[in-house]
Amino acid sequence: MKNLLSFALSILLFATSAYAQRGRVIDANNQPIVQVVVALNDADSTFVKGATTDADGWFDLSSDVRPYILVFKHLSYESRTIRSSQVDLGNVTLKEGQYKLDEVVVQAVEMEEHGSHKTYRFTQKTLGKHVNLLHAMREIPHLDVFANRLSYMGSGSVKVLLNGVNATDTELATLSAEDVVKIELYDPPPARFMGQGFSCVVDIITKRGLTGGTVGINLFDAFHPPFGENSVGVTYNHKDSRWSLNYDNEFKRYKKTRLWEKLDYSFGDEEYNKTKEGLDSPFKRDNNAFQLRYMHRKDNHTFSVTGGFTAWAQTKDNAQNVTYSDGREFAAQNHEGERYKRYTLDLYYDRKLNEKNSLLLNVIGTYYDSRLTSGYTETNHGTESAYFSTNSAVRARKPSVIADASYTHTLAKIGTLSLGVRDHLQYNSQDVATNTNAPYAISTWSNETHVYGQLSGWMWHNKVYYRGMMGLHHSYFKREGFKTVSTPYFSPLLQLYYYPAKGLRLFSSYQLSTTLPSISMLSEVPVWIDNKYAFQGNPALHSYQTHTVWAGMDYSNNQISAALTLMYARSPDAILPFFEEGDDAIFQTYANTLRNEQYVASLSGTYYPFPSKVLAISLRAWAYRYIVKGNGYDWGYNAARAIPSLRLNLDKFNAELFFQSRFKMINGQMLVHSPSAIYAEANYKAAKGLSVGIHWRYPFYRVYEDGRETHPSALVQSVTKSYIYDLPNLVCFRLVYNFSFGRKDQDSRKKVNNADTDSGILMND
């Protein structure tokens, strides 16, 4: 009777579930497969919901999405994707996965293309070859890691998210890789991040329903000179809740830094032509950051509250011997000191209202309390008599609030519609004191509001993915005694991606963006560099627009990944460094130039000579053409840079060799020199979760050098070179230790296979 009642109930459920997607997953021998992860996506490849097959291989999803895409995944079987509009799929057969003992055939990183983003999943075997999750992300095409920082295609900045919530690169260094389900890479970034300067967004998705904690320790230190980049993270999970505490520490102590300068300028009736020979001087930096987060995740929503505190300080005291053109000699001291405290509170909430609608809210409050001191003094040798002396001190306070809200709706047969608004309100007050003027105060209000609408989706038999966005941006800036600036402008974006074959993507895009001057660019607080030469902002600056066009392609398979991008950008009225004469000195400031154009060709590629990916050969290269026209100068400049690297990944040992060529970039009336760089490192996996390594930076270098020089049209002819003699041949020791406590084995067991024991990462997020 009980069985009959169950059967009748099943028939009733079947009759009333007209919008269900159901079926049974079996193998080639018609045997049910247990614990198959079934993901339901809409026609735009946006995830809707998921399920896992039961002991008889059955799955049941209730959804009115039509048509839909089902993705079937199991560690022992090949993945399968089905597009359909049917209610009952019947039997779905999966093929056995291929394994070999002597060679890995399974891809180390599995990728799924969703148009708006790509999803990557790592096997546990791949993760085991790297010191931590952050380093393992180098397996993702075009992502690079240097000094615990992610970059995209060698130079682009990366926005890091954890389950959609703002995170940091160093947080990934202490995150347990076993807790990660997948990594989603958005290239280009989602609409809410457009216009913020990010090349891509990386979202780390962790498992849900865990109980227990993890501790991650990432130490990277040198003894001579004292140098460290360290982080510690503690995470505790209980069902749907996640608590985490992260601490980051950075310190640098150099004793042999030298600042060499050659200056030639005139002010009033006096010529200032001098050479400043740098002497061994100290440099000091300290950065300590704490972050405490609580996150609650359910099937249909995520809530997070994050509090942070940062204390940052840096001091430069450059001693110099100054020789004037007439033979006079002085001893000079050039001081720069900066420190700040930052307090942050980040509130995040997203909710899936139903299968077609979702809402996201994010509010970030920040408070800065900073102090800046600068001074320059020339004294007669052997005396304390000052020939020239100037100094300034600034105390600044800046509270700000960033509010971000977006709504997403899935449109049948069209795509996904996103509507959003982002508002940034900040107040900046500064108390300024100098030895040449009476103390005075500056205060400013600024507000930026960005409203946008975006439509994206597939067309032409799912071969072309499109994305169009229109934004309305309004900026407001007010300073007492100056004209209030209120500027509205549009920011359109159009992108097309064509997928002619598996692994191949062609793309093109156009974007119109507007850049506003920063508070520091507008500030009139002088930072003295020489007797009659100082750095100062320009309150007359105004915003400018940039037209940018991209075109390119990228391709990837299990052996090679390559991308070629061509870019043209035109920015009339761009804000760039400029020199002008003031009442008291010549100022290195900023100005809205007449013309600024950039032509860029970039190449990014990685080649794996062996199927097991034990060896990776990478190359990042760029070629630039700059055209700058300003008040009294017109300059075209060509530049190029190449970054080759070589990585070896064995089960217990990995090593890397990295090189970066020298590079020069024109920026208004300044030409900036970026030095070459080389490092070698090796890491050994001593035990599960424990790695030790050694890092050799700038081997065989005599000195680390960078600098800048001015354009011939500038009022100040200057050549500046910064030397650090105790940075080359820096040897750092690395210790990475990750361990768990109070954990239970919550992963599904893999089907017994007399071959590879790789357990992989499941989709049970």
Image: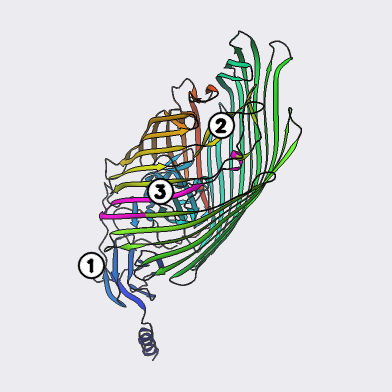
Place residue 322 in its image quadrant: top right
User: What is the distance, in whole Å, between disc 3 and disc 1 at their CAs?
Assistant: 31 Å
Across and down, in percent, residue 130 comes to: 42, 44
434 is higher (above) or lower (below) than 298: above
Question: What's under tag 2, amino acid-wise?
Answer: Phe
Residue 447 visible here: yes
Whichever of callouts 2 and 1 sits on the residue coming sooner in the sequence is 1
Whichever of callouts 3 and 1 sits on the residue coming sooner in the sequence is 1
632 is higher (above) or lower (below) than 550: above
Where does label 2 land, which residue? 227
Where does label 3 land, which residue? 127
Residue displayed at 76% across by 32% down: 438
Across and down, in percent, residue 631 comes to: 50, 32
Q: Are marks 3 and 1 in contact (CB under 8 Å)?
A: no
Place residue 607 in its image quadrant: top left
User: What is the distance, in whole Å, between disc 3 and disc 2 at their CAs?
Assistant: 28 Å
Residue displayed at 35% across by 39% down: 602
Span highlighted in magenta in the image: 495-521
Question: What's under tag 1, amino acid-wise?
Answer: Ala
Q: Is residue 509 magenta?
A: yes
Where does label 1 land, which residue? 28
Residue displayed at 25% across by 63% down: 95
Crowding at mark 3 (Cα within 10 Å: few <14, some 14-19, many 20+): many
